[in-house]
Amino acid sequence: GQNIDQPTEMTATEGAIVQINCTYQTSGFNGLFWYQQHAGEAPTFLSYNVLDGLEEKGRFSSFLSRSKGYSYLLLKELQMKDSASYLCASDNDYKLSFGAGTTVTVRA
Amino acid sequence: GAGVSQSPSNKVTEKGKDVELRCDPISGHTALYWYRQSLGQGLEFLIYFQGNSAPDKSGLPSDRFSAERTGGSVSTLTIQRTQQEDSAVYLCASQGGGVTEAFFGQGTRLTVV
């Protein structure tokens, strides 16, 4: 599959901000997705970027730089319920490939 | 149905038996993926179907694993002669045409004893 790199774990305090970085292969690139997966549940769609720049959806924002093969997911005003794994997924040649996920732990 | 449906939700099988896992994708979705996820691990790609094209089987871990998709809709993942290391959650996802988000089923938790 496509090489997608993201950190394994991140810890932050309730109310804080966390930024999860992701790098992907640019060959045949069509778009970048972020998913959230709570323990024991299926992944659910969070955001989609196809053009350079920042997409904001409430407390969550996602950024894309196509030339750098780089994206990040920004989680603001962290809540305990945001503790989950966050998966970066790249569409290359109309096929989705997922990173291993970043486990975010929110502490009180 | 409204979403991706997988059955069974849980399956316990004895080592050496064959199992079949079923995925009903969202109606009209042309792409279908199978993934495997072990406890605390990321998604492991298994196989990808896109329309009438030949499936991408590059992620199947051994020849004991096979999958088919009949009529461009329902898919079945078959594991022959199951081994304990096959124990995992098997997730199916479907995707509409073009570059759109994939929707996941709730998965089948397979336990080989």
Image: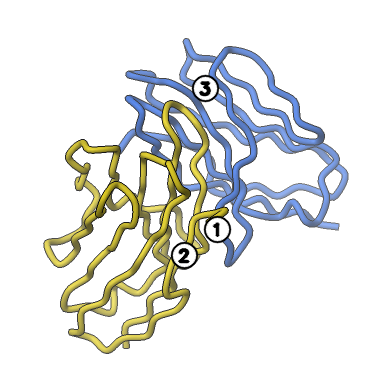
Chain colours: A blue, B yellow
For the C terminus of chain A, the image quarter is: bottom right
- How far, Cα to Cα, is label 1 from label 2? 7 Å
To the question of a shared chain for discs 3 and 2, the answer is no
**Amino acid marked by disc 3:** Tyr
- Tell which circle, 3 or 1, labels the residue nearer the N-terminal end: 1
| Residue highlighted by disc 1 | A42
Q: Which of the chains bears the disc numbered 3?
A: A
On the rendered structure, is A14 left or right of B76?
A: right
Report which quarter residue B70 is drawn in.
bottom left
- How far, Cα to Cα, is label 3 from label 1? 25 Å
**Amino acid marked by disc 2:** Gly
On the rendered structure, is A12 left or right of B33?
A: right
**Amino acid marked by disc 1:** Ala
Asked whether the residues under the numbered discs 1 and 2 touch, taking CB atoms below 8 Å apart as contact, a structural biologist would say yes
| Residue highlighted by disc 3 | A70
Asked whether the residues under the numbered discs 3 and 1 touch, taking CB atoms below 8 Å apart as contact, a structural biologist would say no
Q: Secondary structure at mark 1?
A: loop
To the question of a shared chain for discs 1 and 2, the answer is no
| Residue highlighted by disc 2 | B107
